[in-house]
Amino acid sequence: MGLVRLIGSFLGDRRGPSIEELRKSVPLRSAHASERDCENGGVELALPLDQFRAYRWVPRGLSPQGEKRFELESVGATVWRLCDGRHTFDAIARQLVSKFGMNRLEAEASLAAFLQMLGKRGLVELKVKKKQ
């Protein structure tokens, strides 16, 4: 067993989902995020500061007050609204193709990058059903 595999076995499987698993996955918005519609068709999101990983080690009484705000334009807002726990990655990508005239590959690549960014910020979680 190589060193990389040995370390991987201790850390758990860190590889991302396959494209098939990704297409069947279901993005879900954070329950801690609040939203407000903007005049330009976008949406403004707010997430309490104590939800960020950097602050999770801070005792509750000392956790920071306030919130971090994010503004999404119309395409991002469409994706955000579809991250409801019912629409799969594939269904959201098809919506992007039909609503914004993207080709399939462009929609999937953009969606994957956008969901990864939202996930890093604690706004979205991706429920992936792994193959057995």
Image: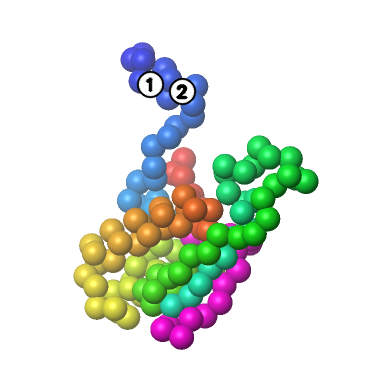
Q: Amino acid at mark 1?
A: Arg
Asked whether residue 38 is drawn in magenta, I would say: yes
Measure the C-alpha gap from mark 1 to mark 2: 6 Å
Question: Dots 1 and 2: beta carbons under 8 Å?
Answer: yes
Q: Residue furthest bottom?
A: 39
Q: Nearer the viewer, residue 128 or 40?
A: 40
Q: How far from the left and from the top, in percent, is residue 132?
A: 46, 40
Going by the image, does 81 lie left or right of 98?
right
State the extent of the magenta-drawn residues as a range. 27-41
What residue is rendered at 44% in x and 78% in y? 42
Going by the image, does 63 lie left or right of 1?
right
Asked whether residue 36 is drawn in magenta, I would say: yes
Residue highlighted by disc 1: 5
Q: Quadrant of residue 35?
A: bottom right
Q: Secondary structure at mark 2?
A: helix
State whether residue 5 appears in this view.
Answer: yes
Q: How far from the left and from the top, in percent, is residue 32?
A: 64, 60
What residue is rendered at 51% in x and 58% in y? 124
What residue is rendered at 52% in x and 80% in y? 37
Residue highlighted by disc 2: 9
Q: Secondary structure at mark 1?
A: helix
